[in-house]
Amino acid sequence: MELTWLGHSGIKIKGSKTVYIDPFLTGNPAASTTPEEIEEANVVIVTHHHDDHLGDAFPICKKTGATLVAIHEVAVEGEAEGITAEGMNVGGTVEANGVRVHMVTAIHSAEKGDPAGVVIELDGKTLYHAGDTALTYDMKLIGEFFHPDLCFLPIGDRYTMGVPSAAKAVEFIQAKKVIPIHYGTFPIVSADPEDFKKRVQNLAEVIILKPGESYTL
């Protein structure tokens, strides 16, 4: 399974299925690709309705025929534009095109619906994308219940966890591997991933990617 950081919170998962999470590409100065370059997708997941997460999700779904998975209100908006969508809510699980998605708690805000994180099961691997969130004790439950192999955690501060709280989140989740996200896109979310790695120490392997770089899990 190949995991690519697209910049900001955008992730591409390439296994037996191709999944995009929060594909904010247009208007993203750190984006490693454009929506025009995306030819294939099976599922597009949106963690919450903010422009820097909803991003190009709808155009990608329209172009590729991918199924949108999102909180109910975002799914309804997508369906109104002719997109095949699976709406859900925190605590629920859906399976779309062979990809199993669990929606979990995130503490944040949203323009429409509620914010969320997602746990994805594909090809025998379990991945946790926290979306935009503060540090929350619910992360302990995510670790105990889902046992993620790898998690994507925001470290940019101001609108999400900063480096110290993200390092504490690693302790809560107890995933063996973590990729920091939601930093470096704009000056307002500057953060040092090396500082994050130093604080995590031996709790997990911290995989620092540049936008466009991939990691094989």
Image (tube, helix red, strand yellow):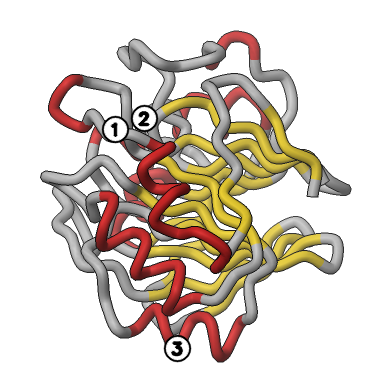
Mark 1 falls on what kind of element?
Answer: helix
Asked if disc 2 and disc 3 are in contact, CB closer than 8 Å, the reply is no
Identity, as a three-letter code, of the amino acid under mark 3 = Leu
- Which residue is nearer to you in this view: 119 or 88? 119
Does the image show residue 199?
A: yes
**Residue 190, placed above or below residue 95:** above
**Mark 3 or mark 1: which comes first in sequence?**
1
Distance from the alpha carbon under mark 2 to that under mark 3: 29 Å
User: Seen in the image, is 89 located left or right of residue 33?
Assistant: left
Q: Name the mark nearer the viewer: 2 or 3.
A: 3
Residue 28 lies, in percent from the top left, at 34, 16
Residue 84 lies, in percent from the top left, at 56, 48
How packed mark 2 is, by other alpha carbons closer than 10 Å (few <14, some 14-19, many 20 or more), is many
Q: Quadrant of residue 7?
A: top left
Identity, as a three-letter code, of the amino acid under mark 1 = Asp
**Mark 2 or mark 3: which comes first in sequence?**
2
User: Seen in the image, is 178 located left or right of residue 96?
Assistant: left
- Which residue is nearer to you in this view: 199 or 47? 199
Identify the residue at horizontal 43%, vertical 37% (top origin): 194
Mark 2 falls on what kind of element?
Answer: loop
Residue labelled with disc 3? 141
Q: Quadrant of residue 121?
A: bottom right
Count of numbered circles on the image:
3
Residue labelled with disc 1? 52
Asked if disc 1 and disc 2 are in contact, CB closer than 8 Å, the reply is yes
Residue labelled with disc 2? 55
Asked if disc 3 and disc 1 are in contact, CB closer than 8 Å, the reply is no
Identify the residue at horizontal 63%, vertical 62% (top origin): 127
